[in-house]
Amino acid sequence: MSKVIYTVGNMVKIPDVGSIALHESVGNIIFVGKMSYEPNIVAVNFFSTQIFPLLKAKYSELKFIIVGANPDERVRKLADIEGVTVTGFVDSIERYFRHSTIVVAPMLTGAGIQNKIIQAMSYGCCVATTTIGAEGLKISNGEIEIFNSTEEWISGMSRLIMNRKQRIDMGRLARQYVIDNLSPQIISRQFWRFIRNGGIDISSL
């Protein structure tokens, strides 16, 4: 006997238009996440040592800002690299999203939808990640960029740094994707469809 499978996605609060990315800076590469989490540690080490120095050599104004609480010692040491900043805990990440050039999530390990990515998308940021980072997202209209090899990261990031219009267009598409698929209204509908049709007795909840 076959069963119907219901999917309830990750929910993202949609920020006001006045809070979204400005796409004015050409020098701020941002990573956001809990910095004691091993996949995040691996990701920022990879980007800081393998990708960022090569980009910094081409674009001297470039900065890589690692934002997130409880940075592991391996993360703190990355601040010794020229242009890399490790903030530790911040009260609000909004200003980092608003003033980002590109938000990166160079995930090499981990699984499932990355909340850091969909949150950045909701702010209309230009987002670049890997195939692992994009798991669970049905990207089909260029909402985010996906790079895997070092060569792809260097060429792709260089293209985005030099093309503000593409960054703006990607941010607009990314924000709309979240509105259409992961906003509170959409997730609420998915949840109540499951409750109504999934055989759950809501009187016992």
Image (cartoon, helix red, strand yellow):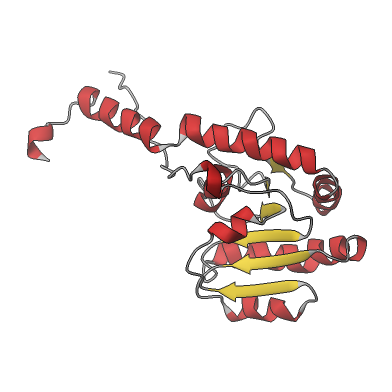
Q: Is 97 above or below relative to 18?
A: below
Residue extending furthest top? 1
Name the side, left or right, on which 53 lies relative to 193.
right
**Residue pictured at 60% horizontal, 81% vertical:** 73
> Where the N terminus falls, by quadrant?
top left
Q: Is 80 above or below relative to 61?
A: below
**Residue pictured at 45% horizontal, 36% vertical:** 182
**Residue pictured at 79% horizontal, 43% vertical:** 164
Give percent across and percent down for residue 98. Answer: 61, 54
Residue extending furthest left? 203
**Residue pictured at 74% horizontal, 48% vertical:** 148
63 vs 152, nearest the viewer: 63
156 vs 150, nearest the viewer: 156
Give percent across and percent down for residue 32. Answer: 58, 60
Give percent across and percent down for residue 158. Answer: 85, 50
Name the side, left or right, on which 138 lies relative to 49.
left
Which of the 4 image quadrants contains residue 59? Answer: bottom right
Is any atom of residue 73 visible in this view? yes
Give percent across and percent down for residue 191. Answer: 30, 33
